[in-house]
Image (cartoon, rainbow, N blue to C red):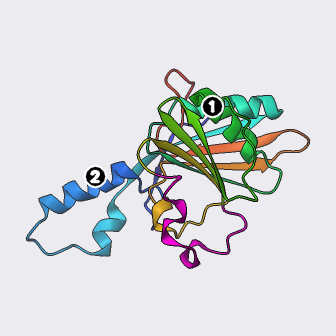
Amino acid sequence: MTTGPRTILPRAGFFNGPAAGRAAARAASRTAGRPAAGAAANASRVLRVTVRSVETTGPEQTESLGAELAATLRAGDVVLVRGELGAGKTTLVRGAARALGVVDPVTSPTFSIGHRYAAGELTVSHLDLYRLAGLEREEPALLADYLGPGRIAFVEWPEEAHVELGDARVRVSISHGGGDRRRIEIAGGDAQPAGAAR
């Protein structure tokens, strides 16, 4: 099952990627010198977010969905991937990484926080923040090698409050559907590749 665009009211730190930042900058420049309208003006702002819901029946389909997701990404993107243990987060990331050109084995970075893979001129980063109690206590540069220009980063077990992850363009949620079935929701950015059913 696939769903189309939804109207979502903004919530602090959610769906405020680069496009939202540019829109806020434009709005600020239009209102320069005028008093701010406060929270009422911000609450009236409406964002259009594409949400795609899919049910896969096995790891191969989950990897294939990851490859479709990769077709919507561009350098500098951050993808937050949520799901319980064993839900298939790394399986989805593996499919995306392969589609982006990674030829090395893609494995869970649980015990090393992150892996970086070469994919032509692009670096694909795969982070697992499960073992971190909170990024506010970590070295500020901890994620610097994994995020930024020339990189696409997939972050498992993300901490919403961390400023560097607030600009995530895509959020993925994976849940068990029984057996090998998974329910996967992809939200934000262009959640569907060109030509996909909406």
107 displayed left or right of 137: right
Image position, residue 147 (x, y; %): 49, 52
Residue at the image point whose x is 57% and y is 74% from the top? 138
Is residue 145 covered in magenta? Answer: yes
**Label 2 amino acid?**
Arg
Q: Which residues are magenta?
A: 129-147
Is residue 132 covered in magenta? Answer: yes
Image position, residue 133 (x, y; %): 67, 75
Quarter placement of the C terminus: top right
Q: Quadrant of residue 128?
A: bottom right
Image position, residue 196 (x, y; %): 56, 24
Residue at the image point whose x is 57% and y is 41% from the top? 124
Nearest the eye: 103 or 58: 103
Quarter placement of the N terminus: top right
- Labels 2 and 1: the sequence-earlier one: 2
Nearest the eye: 147 or 63: 147
Which residue is label 1 attached to? 102
| Mark 2 burial class by Cα count in 10 Å: few <14, some 14-19, many 20+ | few
Which residue is label 2 attached to? 22
Residue at the image point whose x is 34% and y is 48% from the top? 19
Secondary structure found at label 2: helix
User: Can you see residue 1?
Assistant: no
